[in-house]
Image (cartoon, grey):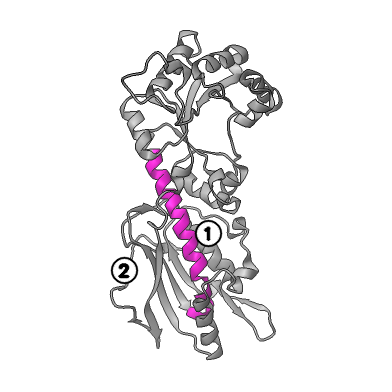
Amino acid sequence: MARKRLDPAIFNLPVEKMRAGYYSDAYFNRAREILERDAHHPIVRMQVFQRHEAVLGGIDEALAILELCSGRTRADGTWEPGRPALRVRALYDGDRLDPYETVLTIEGDYALFAHLETPLLGALSRRTRIATNARDIVAAANGKTVLFFPARFDHHLVQTGDGYAAYVAGALGVSTDANAEWWGAKGMGTVPHALIAAYGGDTVLATQKFAEYIDPGVNVIALVDFENDCVGTSLACARALGDRLWGVRLDTSGTLVDRSLWEQLGTFVPTGVNPQLVRNVRDALDAEGFDRVKIVASGGFTAARIAQFEAAGVPVDAYAVGSAFFEGSGRYDFTADIVAIERDGTWHECHKVGRPERPNPRLEPA
């Protein structure tokens, strides 16, 4: 069964600016200008790769850039699209990558796409970093739900592509509608601290208002650390909301010790959301018959920390993860090289020393 790619239109690319080279390194724009002014139109094969084991992200975005922004300006100033004249083969978003594996090849008149190398590689690099980090976090969670909640840690314009990169790697929930746009879902979340403060610090009241006014199809998840008493607040919310309460979220600061732990100090690190705090909340809910209420853990979780919780059997139902999705900047830089040039209908090897062509049978026409 053929796999599907996203429609290029979904990316809302700034097409005119990309065609003009606005987002491109100046030397690529100058290379295009030289070729056009010299009427030199070499037919080349370019390959794209990165150097680490990874999960591919951004490939559909890169293909959309080629689809909509390749070409040249005619003498009359109108745009002559170039994508149909290019032969493109590519892997798919979510594919696992080996180091130096070719993810994309482009064949055609280099002047048609010389100006697109910068945004094309940028999309691949960022989204692959997000997808790879998401894969590691999802794997550590051992089948439990991972929520993609890092929107507040970066510029809003990156949300949509980042959310999709995390989605193809297995993160099932996102916090903004922009994160979820490309696969047609909606953002989700919990009762925020700010809403609790707006109701005078009354978590139960704020959660009741959330349940009253928000779509009944939305899961009600109470944020229960406002008063640094996760056990007491979880029980109060469960008693007040009954079956309407889907879960509680523990988000205790890494500089605080929750009230339920004060009599248990001495044998573990007590700050933040730690295994004993989760167990205390789970035991308290179960003791009053609220065993169906789920526990979401958040606050500084990484793949390594989640793995520790899972190895210890900590009763977490879902992990909300933030900035850990952005770790490792620079680890997944992509490179594009011309590796062959066509003369008289025959391909001839032509590449920088040390960058030979690496054919990849997994590539499919795009």
Drawn side of residue 38 relative to residue 264, left or right: right
Q: Which residue is mark 2?
A: 358
**Element type at marker 2?**
loop
Q: Distance between the Cα atoms at labels 1 and 2?
A: 23 Å
- Residue occupying image coordinates x 53% and y 68%: 66
Question: Would you identify the image quadrant in which residue 48 lies?
Answer: bottom left
| Badge 1 or badge 2: first in the primary sequence | 1
Drawn side of residue 5 relative to residue 81, left or right: left
Residue 260 location, x and y as percent?
45, 16
Q: Is residue 329 visible?
A: yes
Q: Relative to the observer, which residue lies in front, 355 or 2?
A: 355
> Mark 1–mark 2 contact, CB under 8 Å?
no
Question: Would you identify the image quadrant in which residue 187 lies?
Answer: top right
- The label number, if any, that marks residue 61 in the structure image: 1
Residue ranking furthest to the bottom = 38
Looking at numbered disc 1 in the image, what kind of residue is underneath it? Glu
Q: Residues within 10 Å of mark 1 (few under 14, many from 20)?
A: many
Drawn side of residue 155 relative to residue 344, left or right: right
Q: Relative to the observer, which residue lies in front, 80 or 65?
A: 65
Drawn side of residue 238 relative to residue 110, left or right: right
**Element type at marker 1?**
helix
- Residue occupying image coordinates x 60% and y 50%: 156
Magenta residue span: 110-138
- Residue occupying image coordinates x 61% and y 28%: 191
Asked whether residue 114 is drawn in magenta, I would say yes
